[in-house]
Amino acid sequence: MSTIRRAAQLLAGRTQILVFTGAGISTESGIPDFRGPNGVWTRVDPNEFTINRYLANPETRRRSWRTRAESGVLEARPNDAHRAVVDLWRAGRMIGCVTQNIDGLHQRAGLPGGDVVELHGNAHRTVCVACGARMATSAALERVVAGDDDPACRDCGGILKTDVVFFGEMLPDGATERAFDLATRCDAVLAVGSTLSVYPAAYVPMEALKTGSHLVIVNQGPTEMDDLATVRIEGPAGTVLPDLVAAVTA
Ligand code: NAD
């Protein structure tokens, strides 16, 4: 039996599926992942992205804004995998979606914001680290493109940063609690496009396993939890997920 059919049989009767996503669900939307074969870490040093460096070093901030402007994250469109998650939700099979992604593509595909927990923030928002003022990242990037390459807060002069979790930062208030609550109440986890190696995020599927849930993994390449999965499907999310969701909801 194919792995998709085995996973569909496992998920078929369930109504509390927790979808847990990583950068791999968005590569088919043109956003590179971090740890895949063409991932960002094959070209860029992760140590550049610590919060301490960002706050201390204007040159790091300039590079960070330039990278954000060139990344294409803000312009990206959802792909068939994001749309398949929405189909699963519309069929009444999901308890929610916990994502490590910062691209907002689940919501853009049609998943209600209240059903998405963004563990690592959202790149569409920018905040002032001093006064907490918020603005659209597109507005900050307009200033960067116009030559203000390390834009300061217009209210207080503080340092601006996109509202995403840098290395060395805490996860957003409430996000961990909501994610763990879903993990303890779900009846299966469908993990898509993640190496399941970034902590504390990866504690979420771990917690679900501890409370007796099954784990289905859809990924290209190995993950840290392959041995713990009931079914592991190797393949591109944009092809696998629509087939899987169609089989689950048939
Ligand atoms: P990761 O980079 O560690 O792993 C991604 C996994 O997805 C890899 O195993 C890769 O081979 C696989 N993959 C790539 N394309 C795929 C496809 N089309 N179908 C199925 N699998 C595919 O990603 P992660 O586990 O999410 O951790 C990386 C961290 O980077 C996260 O914390 C996340 O916040 C951040 N990140 C986010 C984005 C985004 O928002 N789109 C992009 C890059 C990194």
Image (tube, rainbow, N blue to C red):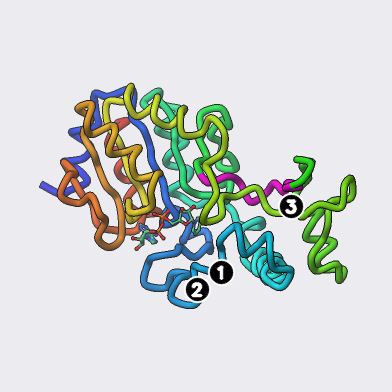
Q: CA distance from mark 3 to mark 2?
A: 23 Å
Disc 3 residue type (three-letter): Thr
SS for tag 2?
loop
Which residue is identified by label 2?
45
Position in image of residue 250 (x %, y %): 29, 31
**Camera-side mark, 3 or 2:** 2
Q: Position of residue 166 (x, y in %)?
A: 56, 55
Res 207 quadrant in image: top left
Residue 152 falls within the magenta-colored stretch: no
Residue 28 vertical position relative to residue 95 in the rendered view, above or below: below
- Distance from mark 1 CB to nearest ligand 1 atom below 8 Å: no
The residue lying toward the viewer, choosing from 210 and 12, is 210
Q: CA distance from mark 1 to mark 3?
A: 20 Å
Does residue 243 appear left or right of residue 175 in this picture?
A: left
Counting residues from the N terminus, which is met first, the one under dot 1 or under dot 3? 1
- Residue appearing at x 43%, y 39% in the figure: 85
Q: Looking at the picture, tell me which residue is in the foreground, 23 or 133.
A: 133
In the image: residue 84, left or right of residue 129: left
Q: Which residue is mark 1?
A: 48
Q: Spatial distance from mark 2 to mark 1, Cα to Cα?
A: 6 Å
Identify the residue at image location x=33%, y=22%: 185
User: How many numbered marks, from 0 up?
Assistant: 3
Marks 1 and 3 in Cβ contact (< 8 Å): no
| Label 2–label 1 contact, CB within 8 A | yes
Sequence order check, earlier mark of 3 and 2? 2
Q: Amino acid at mark 2?
A: Asp
> Magenta segment, which residues?
120-129
Q: Amino acid at mark 1?
A: Glu
Main SS, magenta region, reads strand
Measured from the top left, where is residue 140 in percent x and y?
A: 79, 56
Instruction: Determine the image quadrant of residue 92.
Output: top left
Q: Is mark 2 within 8 Å of ligand 1?
A: no
